[in-house]
Amino acid sequence: MATAASTPPARAVALGCCLVAWMTPAVALADDKGEAERLFQEGRGLMLQKRFAEACPKIEQSQRLDPHVGTLLNLAACHEQVGRFAAAWVEYQQALTAARAEGQKDRERLALERIEVVEPRVPWLTLRVAQRPAIHGLSVTLDGASIPPAAWEKEMPVDPGEHLVSATAPSHKAWQVKVELRESEHKAVDVSALEAIEPAPPAPAHTDTPPAPVAPAVVPKQTVEKPPASPSRWSFEIGLFGGYLGASGGRVQPQVDPRSIALRDTNGADSDCSYAGCSYTLHDGNGGVVGVNLSGSYALSDTVRIGGRLLAGPRIGRGGGSLWAFGPTMTLQISDTVWTGVSALIGGGSASGYGEVAPPARYYQAGGGPYVMDSSYGDPALGAAVELGMILAKLPRGSVGVSVMPLFLRADNGTMWTVPLNVSYRF
């Protein structure tokens, strides 16, 4: 009876142990994520206080417990701030690979931008090993980390500062040298020939020889091949535009010689506009305009670009004329496909069409006409433009976009304005 009575509690204990064993990995995983989040928040807070030396270990431990692309980018930024440019460069490379794999375009672009900034500051070290492979068991280390033979004779990224290069081999004297590297420096170290050690005479049979010390295990340091050149920060745009063109005022002159415009005064005497000083008015100054839009810009960041723009084209419709303008521009990338921008412009324009001759008082036109008039705007004119655009298609070496770009040019003698639609190729 005693045995039967003890059975249910024993089964309960066994079942409880199984449940605890099943739940333990999940609980440990949740604890790791919670601890990783706590360390990340503490590290970010320290970075905001510019206490980077304290922040980096916390963010590094957070990434070790719960890896994320965002955490890795923050760790790279922290190492960049403390001058560990090689570590930052490797971490930005890892973040770039992870962001591409996860389809995170913004973080991929950020990683590329930071790689381009950091890479010129990374020191590179080459270990040239003279006795390769003459000495069996030759081992080369950098700051205590073993460098595999495949990395010998190749450039490796290292952080700025002092580093210790060592070489050892069985039955040879150890060799080491200190090397100092500054930002952007490329340096090579020749690992000198190791001096062989004469074998010691055998110990007497009765002598107890203590065992040789075991060398500590060293984790090989990962070497990273230099990546291909980062994309250029420069971009260029070529496009065609067309739109409505409006004009008011302007300096109007007839296409014919004013002396050929006959006048007669109230007394019946003949004269002309050159003598009397006529004024002129242009009809149909408004119309359309088509032309080319050229621009170049430089990326200050992943969202802001500065550059210059040129627009020029003929006036279409009755008569003729033209519009031209150029000046500095700044654009802001709102998203992957939408941008906006502003431009300061200097330029001018002209328009042609039929107009009226207005003789001064006591004169009237004796005949002729109608006359074709030319109107000019600006010497030069000043103005501005705003732009809102969207990418329609991304191509292997650029993108096709469309934008609307209202602009005006104002001079002492008149104003021109247009609302062109622009289709362009950016590369």
Image: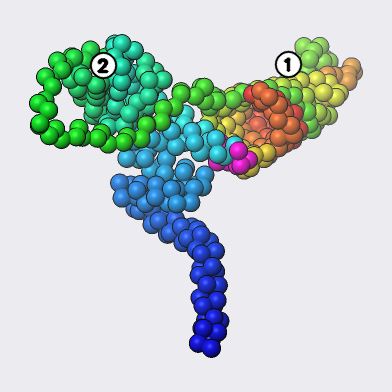
In the depicted view, which residue is nearer to us: 250 or 256? 250
Numbered-mark total: 2
Work out which quarter of the rendered image holds the C terminus and state it. top right
Examine the rendering and report whether any part of residue 166 can be seen: yes
What is the crowding at mark 1: few (fewer than 14 residues within 10 Å), some, or many (at least 20)? Answer: few
Residue 232, by quadrant, is: top right
Q: Amino acid at mark 1?
A: Tyr
First in residue order: circle 2 vs circle 1? 2
Image x and y of residue 86, in percent: 37, 31
Q: Position of residue 1 (x, y in %)?
A: 53, 88
- Residue at image location 59% in from the left, 36% down from the top: 100
**Start and end of the magenta stretch?**
101-110
Is 108 within the magenta?
yes
For the point 33% across and 13% down, the residue is: 132
- Residue at x 37% of width, y 51% of height: 58
Main secondary-structure element of the magenta-colored stretch = helix
Neighbourhood count class around disc 2 (C-alpha, 10 Å): few under 14, some 14–19, many 20 upward: some
Residue reaching furthest bottom? 1
Q: Nearer the viewer, mark 2 or mark 1?
A: 2
Mark-to-mark CA distance, 2 and 1: 97 Å
Whole-percent x and y of residue 14? 52, 72
As drawn, 137 above or below 73: above
Colour scheme: rainbow
**Residue at disc 2, secondary structure:** strand
Marks 2 and 1 close (CB-CB < 8 Å)? no
Tell me the residue that label 2 is attached to.
191
Question: What label sits on residue 275 in the rendered view?
Answer: 1
